[in-house]
Amino acid sequence: MLTVGRDTIVVAASAGAAEALRLLLGTLPADLPAAVLVVPQGAGPPAGVLDRAGPLKTLPAEDGRIVEHGHVYVAGPGRHLLLDDGRIRLSRGPRHHGRRPAADPLFMSAALDAGVRVAAVVLSGALDDGARGCVAVDRHGGAVAVQDPAEAALPGMPVAALTAVPNASVLPARELADWLVRQSRTPVITEEAVDDTDLIREVSRFLGPPSAPGEAADGLTGLSCPECGGPLYETAGRHVCRVGHSWSEESLVDAQADAMERALWAAVHRLEERVRILDRLERSAGKRSRGDLLEEAASTRHVLDTIRTLQTRTGRGDSGLLPL
Protein backbone atom coordinates (compact mmCIF):
# COMPACT_ATOMS: atom_id res chain seq x y z
CA MET A 1 0.00 0.00 0.00
CA LEU A 2 1.05 3.64 -0.39
CA THR A 3 2.62 5.31 2.59
CA VAL A 4 4.43 8.54 3.33
CA GLY A 5 7.36 9.56 1.21
CA ARG A 6 10.94 8.70 2.05
CA ASP A 7 11.23 10.56 5.33
CA THR A 8 14.58 9.15 6.51
CA ILE A 9 17.56 10.67 4.72
CA VAL A 10 21.09 9.41 5.38
CA VAL A 11 24.18 11.17 4.03
CA ALA A 12 27.83 10.07 3.84
CA ALA A 13 30.33 12.91 3.46
CA SER A 14 34.07 12.36 3.65
CA ALA A 15 37.22 14.04 2.33
CA GLY A 16 36.49 16.82 -0.14
CA ALA A 17 32.75 16.88 0.61
CA ALA A 18 32.52 19.93 2.89
CA GLU A 19 31.32 22.33 0.20
CA ALA A 20 28.94 19.79 -1.36
CA LEU A 21 27.45 19.06 2.07
CA ARG A 22 26.90 22.77 2.79
CA LEU A 23 25.28 23.18 -0.64
CA LEU A 24 23.03 20.18 -0.07
CA LEU A 25 21.84 21.24 3.38
CA GLY A 26 21.60 24.88 2.37
CA THR A 27 19.20 24.03 -0.47
CA LEU A 28 16.82 21.79 1.46
CA PRO A 29 13.58 23.63 2.42
CA ALA A 30 12.55 24.41 5.99
CA ASP A 31 9.36 22.35 5.60
CA LEU A 32 11.16 19.19 4.49
CA PRO A 33 8.98 16.23 5.57
CA ALA A 34 11.99 14.15 6.51
CA ALA A 35 14.82 13.85 9.03
CA VAL A 36 18.42 14.00 7.81
CA LEU A 37 21.25 12.05 9.46
CA VAL A 38 24.80 12.89 8.39
CA VAL A 39 28.14 11.16 8.91
CA PRO A 40 30.85 13.75 8.13
CA GLN A 41 34.08 11.75 8.40
CA GLY A 42 37.51 13.09 9.20
CA ALA A 43 37.59 16.82 9.83
CA GLY A 44 34.10 17.38 8.48
CA PRO A 45 32.05 20.44 9.44
CA PRO A 46 30.53 20.15 12.94
CA ALA A 47 26.83 20.61 13.57
CA GLY A 48 27.29 24.24 14.66
CA VAL A 49 28.84 25.14 11.30
CA LEU A 50 26.28 23.21 9.26
CA ASP A 51 23.43 24.84 11.21
CA ARG A 52 24.30 28.09 9.42
CA ALA A 53 24.21 26.43 5.99
CA GLY A 54 20.42 26.58 5.55
CA PRO A 55 16.97 26.78 7.13
CA LEU A 56 16.91 23.29 8.68
CA LYS A 57 17.77 23.01 12.37
CA THR A 58 21.07 21.14 12.63
CA LEU A 59 21.96 19.39 15.87
CA PRO A 60 24.75 17.12 17.11
CA ALA A 61 23.46 13.57 17.35
CA GLU A 62 22.43 12.59 20.89
CA ASP A 63 21.86 9.02 22.02
CA GLY A 64 18.19 8.19 22.49
CA ARG A 65 16.79 11.26 20.71
CA ILE A 66 13.70 10.66 18.57
CA VAL A 67 14.37 11.90 15.03
CA GLU A 68 12.04 14.66 13.85
CA HIS A 69 11.19 15.94 10.40
CA GLY A 70 12.87 19.19 9.45
CA HIS A 71 15.98 18.44 11.52
CA VAL A 72 19.52 17.46 10.62
CA TYR A 73 21.48 15.23 13.03
CA VAL A 74 25.26 15.16 12.65
CA ALA A 75 27.54 12.42 13.96
CA GLY A 76 30.35 13.60 16.21
CA PRO A 77 33.85 12.13 16.40
CA GLY A 78 34.53 8.79 18.03
CA ARG A 79 31.05 7.23 17.93
CA HIS A 80 29.00 5.55 15.21
CA LEU A 81 25.59 7.05 14.45
CA LEU A 82 22.80 4.51 13.99
CA LEU A 83 19.02 4.50 13.79
CA ASP A 84 16.98 2.11 15.91
CA ASP A 85 13.20 2.22 16.31
CA GLY A 86 13.08 5.82 15.15
CA ARG A 87 15.68 6.91 17.68
CA ILE A 88 19.33 7.86 17.40
CA ARG A 89 21.79 5.38 18.83
CA LEU A 90 25.43 6.30 19.36
CA SER A 91 27.93 3.49 19.59
CA ARG A 92 31.58 3.09 20.51
CA GLY A 93 31.45 -0.27 18.75
CA PRO A 94 34.23 -1.56 16.51
CA ARG A 95 35.70 0.68 13.85
CA HIS A 96 34.33 0.01 10.39
CA HIS A 97 36.82 0.32 7.52
CA GLY A 98 39.09 1.76 10.21
CA ARG A 99 36.65 4.60 10.86
CA ARG A 100 34.34 5.66 13.67
CA PRO A 101 31.93 7.11 12.77
CA ALA A 102 31.48 5.34 9.46
CA ALA A 103 28.72 5.60 6.89
CA ASP A 104 27.92 1.89 6.52
CA PRO A 105 26.59 1.37 10.08
CA LEU A 106 24.19 4.32 9.69
CA PHE A 107 22.99 3.24 6.25
CA MET A 108 22.55 -0.41 7.28
CA SER A 109 20.68 0.44 10.49
CA ALA A 110 18.43 2.87 8.61
CA ALA A 111 17.63 0.18 6.03
CA LEU A 112 16.55 -2.16 8.83
CA ASP A 113 14.62 0.51 10.73
CA ALA A 114 12.88 2.45 7.95
CA GLY A 115 13.11 0.19 4.89
CA VAL A 116 11.45 1.71 1.84
CA ARG A 117 11.31 5.12 3.54
CA VAL A 118 15.11 5.62 3.30
CA ALA A 119 16.88 7.89 0.82
CA ALA A 120 20.67 7.60 0.89
CA VAL A 121 23.22 10.04 -0.52
CA VAL A 122 26.97 9.48 -0.93
CA LEU A 123 29.18 12.52 -1.41
CA SER A 124 32.90 12.89 -2.09
CA GLY A 125 35.35 10.64 -0.27
CA ALA A 126 38.12 8.10 -0.74
CA LEU A 127 37.80 4.30 -0.65
CA ASP A 128 34.40 2.60 -0.37
CA ASP A 129 32.68 3.34 2.94
CA GLY A 130 28.95 3.64 2.29
CA ALA A 131 28.84 1.16 -0.59
CA ARG A 132 27.70 -1.80 1.52
CA GLY A 133 25.18 0.43 3.27
CA CYS A 134 23.79 1.52 -0.10
CA VAL A 135 23.29 -2.14 -1.05
CA ALA A 136 21.29 -2.61 2.16
CA VAL A 137 19.17 0.49 1.48
CA ASP A 138 18.48 -0.65 -2.08
CA ARG A 139 17.65 -4.22 -1.02
CA HIS A 140 15.11 -2.94 1.52
CA GLY A 141 13.37 -0.77 -1.07
CA GLY A 142 15.02 2.59 -0.39
CA ALA A 143 16.50 4.99 -2.94
CA VAL A 144 20.20 5.78 -3.49
CA ALA A 145 21.90 8.77 -5.11
CA VAL A 146 25.58 9.67 -5.45
CA GLN A 147 27.37 12.90 -6.17
CA ASP A 148 28.55 12.91 -9.78
CA PRO A 149 32.08 11.43 -9.56
CA ALA A 150 33.19 13.84 -12.29
CA GLU A 151 32.73 16.79 -9.91
CA ALA A 152 33.64 15.10 -6.63
CA ALA A 153 36.98 16.11 -5.16
CA LEU A 154 37.60 12.43 -4.33
CA PRO A 155 35.37 10.14 -6.41
CA GLY A 156 36.20 6.90 -4.57
CA MET A 157 33.09 6.70 -2.38
CA PRO A 158 30.57 7.75 -5.08
CA VAL A 159 32.14 5.34 -7.60
CA ALA A 160 32.12 2.47 -5.09
CA ALA A 161 28.45 3.12 -4.20
CA LEU A 162 27.50 3.32 -7.88
CA THR A 163 29.35 0.08 -8.60
CA ALA A 164 27.51 -1.62 -5.74
CA VAL A 165 24.11 -0.14 -6.73
CA PRO A 166 24.18 0.44 -10.51
CA ASN A 167 20.63 1.86 -10.54
CA ALA A 168 21.58 4.70 -8.16
CA SER A 169 20.90 8.24 -9.36
CA VAL A 170 24.02 10.21 -10.35
CA LEU A 171 23.62 13.94 -9.79
CA PRO A 172 25.77 17.04 -9.28
CA ALA A 173 25.71 18.34 -5.74
CA ARG A 174 23.46 21.28 -6.64
CA GLU A 175 20.70 18.86 -7.79
CA LEU A 176 20.80 16.40 -4.90
CA ALA A 177 18.58 18.54 -2.68
CA ASP A 178 15.80 18.62 -5.32
CA TRP A 179 16.09 14.84 -5.66
CA LEU A 180 15.69 14.44 -1.89
CA VAL A 181 12.70 16.77 -1.78
CA ARG A 182 10.99 14.69 -4.50
CA GLN A 183 11.78 11.48 -2.65
CA SER A 184 10.38 12.87 0.61
CA ARG A 185 7.13 14.09 -0.98
CA THR A 186 6.34 11.17 -3.27
CA PRO A 187 4.39 8.36 -1.54
CA VAL A 188 6.11 4.99 -1.76
CA ILE A 189 4.70 1.49 -1.71
CA THR A 190 5.20 -0.38 1.52
CA GLU A 191 6.73 -3.74 0.75
CA GLU A 192 6.88 -6.89 2.80
CA ALA A 193 9.79 -6.77 5.24
CA VAL A 194 12.99 -8.30 3.88
CA ASP A 195 14.36 -11.27 5.82
CA ASP A 196 17.92 -10.07 6.41
CA THR A 197 19.41 -12.11 9.25
CA ASP A 198 23.01 -11.35 8.28
CA LEU A 199 22.38 -7.59 8.27
CA ILE A 200 20.60 -7.77 11.63
CA ARG A 201 23.57 -9.64 13.08
CA GLU A 202 26.02 -7.11 11.65
CA VAL A 203 24.16 -4.07 12.97
CA SER A 204 23.75 -5.72 16.38
CA ARG A 205 27.54 -5.64 16.78
CA PHE A 206 27.29 -1.87 16.99
CA LEU A 207 24.24 -1.81 19.25
CA GLY A 208 25.29 -4.52 21.69
CA PRO A 209 28.35 -6.34 23.07
CA PRO A 210 30.93 -7.35 20.43
CA SER A 211 30.56 -10.90 19.16
CA ALA A 212 32.55 -13.25 16.98
CA PRO A 213 31.54 -13.77 13.35
CA GLY A 214 28.49 -16.00 13.05
CA GLU A 215 28.22 -19.39 11.44
CA ALA A 216 27.92 -17.73 8.04
CA ALA A 217 31.62 -16.88 8.14
CA ASP A 218 33.54 -18.80 5.47
CA GLY A 219 36.51 -19.38 7.75
CA LEU A 220 39.88 -17.98 8.63
CA THR A 221 41.62 -16.05 5.89
CA GLY A 222 45.17 -16.27 7.22
CA LEU A 223 45.17 -12.48 7.54
CA SER A 224 45.25 -10.36 10.68
CA CYS A 225 43.16 -7.34 11.58
CA PRO A 226 45.12 -4.07 11.08
CA GLU A 227 43.19 -2.54 13.98
CA CYS A 228 43.69 -5.13 16.73
CA GLY A 229 45.90 -7.84 15.27
CA GLY A 230 43.29 -10.58 15.68
CA PRO A 231 42.55 -13.21 12.99
CA LEU A 232 40.24 -12.22 10.17
CA TYR A 233 37.31 -14.30 8.96
CA GLU A 234 35.72 -13.94 5.54
CA THR A 235 31.98 -13.46 5.42
CA ALA A 236 29.79 -12.05 2.64
CA GLY A 237 32.81 -10.66 0.82
CA ARG A 238 34.11 -8.84 3.89
CA HIS A 239 36.85 -9.50 6.41
CA VAL A 240 35.72 -9.45 10.07
CA CYS A 241 37.72 -10.11 13.23
CA ARG A 242 36.34 -11.52 16.48
CA VAL A 243 36.17 -8.06 18.01
CA GLY A 244 33.94 -6.93 15.14
CA HIS A 245 36.27 -4.73 13.09
CA SER A 246 35.02 -5.04 9.52
CA TRP A 247 36.93 -4.39 6.29
CA SER A 248 36.23 -4.43 2.60
CA GLU A 249 39.10 -5.53 0.35
CA GLU A 250 39.89 -1.89 -0.47
CA SER A 251 39.81 -0.57 3.08
CA LEU A 252 41.85 -3.58 4.26
CA VAL A 253 44.62 -2.80 1.77
CA ASP A 254 44.54 0.84 2.89
CA ALA A 255 44.72 -0.06 6.59
CA GLN A 256 47.51 -2.57 5.96
CA ALA A 257 49.50 0.18 4.28
CA ASP A 258 49.14 2.35 7.38
CA ALA A 259 50.10 -0.53 9.67
CA MET A 260 53.10 -1.40 7.51
CA GLU A 261 54.29 2.20 7.50
CA ARG A 262 54.01 2.39 11.30
CA ALA A 263 55.95 -0.87 11.62
CA LEU A 264 58.73 0.36 9.35
CA TRP A 265 59.04 3.64 11.25
CA ALA A 266 59.22 1.68 14.51
CA ALA A 267 62.02 -0.43 13.02
CA VAL A 268 63.86 2.71 11.92
CA HIS A 269 63.57 4.14 15.43
CA ARG A 270 64.96 0.96 17.05
CA LEU A 271 67.81 0.66 14.57
CA GLU A 272 68.82 4.30 15.08
CA GLU A 273 68.91 3.68 18.84
CA ARG A 274 71.06 0.60 18.28
CA VAL A 275 73.55 2.56 16.17
CA ARG A 276 73.85 5.22 18.87
CA ILE A 277 74.45 2.58 21.57
CA LEU A 278 77.06 0.79 19.46
CA ASP A 279 78.83 4.09 18.79
CA ARG A 280 79.00 4.78 22.55
CA LEU A 281 80.35 1.31 23.22
CA GLU A 282 82.95 1.68 20.48
CA ARG A 283 84.25 4.95 21.93
CA SER A 284 84.66 3.42 25.38
CA ALA A 285 85.87 -0.04 24.32
CA GLY A 286 89.44 -1.28 24.17
CA LYS A 287 91.28 -1.83 20.91
CA ARG A 288 90.53 -5.59 20.81
CA SER A 289 86.73 -5.26 20.86
CA ARG A 290 86.54 -2.00 18.93
CA GLY A 291 86.75 -3.73 15.55
CA ASP A 292 83.78 -6.00 16.26
CA LEU A 293 81.70 -3.04 17.39
CA LEU A 294 82.60 -1.04 14.28
CA GLU A 295 81.59 -3.99 12.09
CA GLU A 296 78.26 -4.44 13.89
CA ALA A 297 77.51 -0.69 13.75
CA ALA A 298 78.24 -0.67 9.99
CA SER A 299 75.95 -3.68 9.47
CA THR A 300 73.18 -2.01 11.47
CA ARG A 301 73.53 1.20 9.43
CA HIS A 302 73.20 -0.86 6.25
CA VAL A 303 69.97 -2.45 7.52
CA LEU A 304 68.74 0.99 8.60
CA ASP A 305 69.37 2.47 5.14
CA THR A 306 67.60 -0.50 3.52
CA ILE A 307 64.48 -0.10 5.66
CA ARG A 308 64.41 3.67 5.06
CA THR A 309 64.47 2.94 1.33
CA LEU A 310 61.67 0.38 1.70
CA GLN A 311 59.61 2.86 3.68
CA THR A 312 59.75 5.44 0.88
CA ARG A 313 58.69 2.81 -1.67
CA THR A 314 55.85 1.14 0.20
CA GLY A 315 53.98 4.08 1.78
CA ARG A 316 50.58 5.05 0.48
CA GLY A 317 50.25 7.45 -2.43
CA ASP A 318 47.73 10.28 -2.58
CA SER A 319 45.17 7.87 -4.03
CA GLY A 320 45.16 5.89 -0.78
CA LEU A 321 46.56 2.80 -2.51
CA LEU A 322 50.05 1.37 -2.53
CA PRO A 323 52.15 2.74 -5.41
CA LEU A 324 53.07 0.24 -8.11
Image: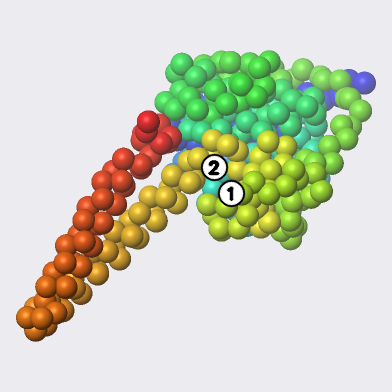
Residue at the farthest front position: 288
> Amino acid under label 1?
Leu
Of residues 66 and 305, the one drawn nearer to the viewer in this rendering:
305
Camera-side mark, 1 or 2: 1
How many angstroms separate mark 1 from mark 2 (CA)? 10 Å
* Quarter occupied by the C terminus: top left
SS at mark 2 in the image: helix
**Residue 280 rendering spot, x and y as whole percentages:** 14, 77
Q: Nearer the viewer, residue 71 or 1?
A: 1
User: What residue is pinned by disc 1?
Assistant: 223
Query: What is the number of the mark on residue 252?
Result: 2
Residue found at x 42% / y 50%: 260
- Amino acid at pointer 2: Leu
Quick one: 102 or 26, which is closer to the camera? Answer: 102
Q: Residue at x 22, y 52 (%)?
A: 305
Q: Residue at x 76, y 35 (%)?
A: 111
Furthest toward the left, the residue is 287
Which of pointers 1 and 2 lies earlier in the amino acid sequence? 1
The answer to whether 131 is drawn above or below residue 67 in the figure is above
- Pointers 1 and 2 in contact (CB under 8 A)? yes
- 169 vs 190, left or right, is left
Q: Position of residue 320 (x, y in %)?
A: 42, 36
Relative side of 313 to 234, left or right: left
Q: Is residue 228 above or below residue 88?
A: below
| Residue 68, numbered label | none
Where, by quadrant of the figure, is residue 281 drawn?
Answer: bottom left
| Label 1 SS | strand
In the image, residue 204 sits, relative to residue 5, either above or below, namely below
Report whether 111 appears left or right of 312: right
Q: Quadrant of the N terminus?
A: top right
**Residue 252 vs residue 68: left or right?**
left
Res. 166 image quadrant: top right
